[in-house]
Image: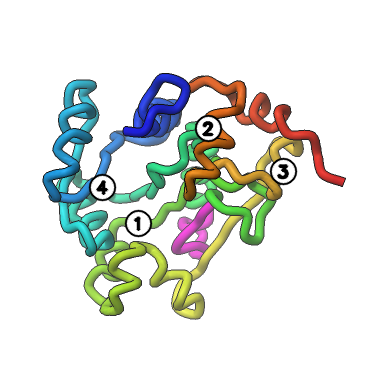
């Protein structure tokens, strides 16, 4: 609910996610603790679906949200990524569907610059609901329950993990951090000349290339 250029951060995330053409429904999965009543009230007034589940078992919350809404493929989007971009999500979905159909991919991502050249915070991560349910049934460590897809990263031998580069070379800026993990990240975004409909190309233009 923190204001970023006049809008709550969650509104940036939902608005920019809704620019994706291949997502059937956007669901905000928050916890069932009372302090999140305000978030649910705010989103419900805008017609945004909200699912509420366990505070600490984020993996189960994510699974339950997918089950409740009948998901076959799920896309996980972090609510601290106000500059996420719908077309980047579409690229991810297309990539996963193509690679998964070929038997080459269980889980795909473009939200972090790990093995790819995406900026941090522009994309998302995706997998089938069936795989999500399997992970939720088998993951036992508290860290894997709290960080809901970390089980995949910690067991790379069990899963086909794939990523890719942005089609537009201009967006190949893995040096850029566009998410909001700390107060310093928030201040950096608050001082940028940005608006909720700004394109990734316009964002990248705000940062001169390094070197």
| Residue stretch in magenta | 99-109
Is residue 109 visible to the viewer in this orientation of the structure? Answer: yes
Q: Quadrant of residue 69?
A: top left
Q: Pointer 1 and pointer 4: residues touching (CB < 8 Å)? A: no
List x then y, in percent, for residue 14.
36, 31
Q: Residues within 10 Å of mark 3 (few under 14, many from 20)?
A: some
* Closest to the observer, 97 or 124: 124
Q: Give the CA separation, mark 3 to mark 1.
A: 27 Å
> Of the numbered discs in the image, which one, if any, rests on residue 71?
4
Closer to the chain start, of discs 3 and 1, is 1
List x then y, in percent, for residue 38.
18, 33
Is residue 21 visible to the viewer in this orientation of the structure? Answer: no
Q: Pointer 1 and pointer 2: residues touching (CB < 8 Å)? A: no
The vertical placement of 148 against 71, above or below, is below
Q: Give the CA separation, mark 1 to mark 4.
A: 8 Å
Q: Would you name the residue on which mark 2 appears? A: 87
Q: Give the CA separation, mark 1 to mark 2.
A: 20 Å
What SS does tag 2 mark? Answer: helix
Please give the name of the residue rendered at 26% of the width and 54% of the height, measured from the top-left corner.
Answer: 62
Q: Would you name the residue on which mark 1 appears? A: 128
Q: Is residue 107 left or right of residue 52?
A: right
């Amino acid at each position: 609910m923190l204001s970023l250029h006049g809008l709550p951060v969650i509104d940036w995330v939902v608005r920019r996610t809704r620019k994706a053409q291949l997502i059937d429904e956007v669901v905000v999965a928050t916890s069932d603790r009372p302090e999140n009543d305000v978030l649910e009230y705010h989103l419900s007034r805008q017609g945004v679906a909200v699912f509420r589940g366990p505070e600490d078992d984020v993996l189960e919350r994510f699974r339950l949200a997918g089950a409740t809404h009948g998901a076959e493929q799920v896309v996980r989007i972090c609510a601290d990524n106000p500059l996420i971009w719908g077309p980047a999500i579409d690229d991810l979905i297309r990539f996963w569907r193509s690679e998964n159909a070929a038997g080459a991919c269980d889980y795909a991502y473009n939200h972090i610059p790990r093995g790819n050249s995406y900026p941090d915070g522009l994309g998302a991560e995706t997998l089938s609901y069936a795989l999500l349910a399997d992970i939720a049934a088998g993951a036992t460590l508290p860290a894997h329950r709290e960080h809901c897809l970390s089980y995949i990263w910690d067991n790379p031998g069990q899963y086909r993990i794939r990523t890719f580069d942005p089609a537009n070379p201009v967006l190949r800026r893995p040096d850029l951090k566009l998410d909001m993990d700390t107060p310093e990240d928030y201040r950096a975004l608050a001082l940028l000349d940005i608006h909720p409909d700004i394109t990734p190309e316009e964002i990248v233009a705000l940062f001169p290339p390094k070197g």
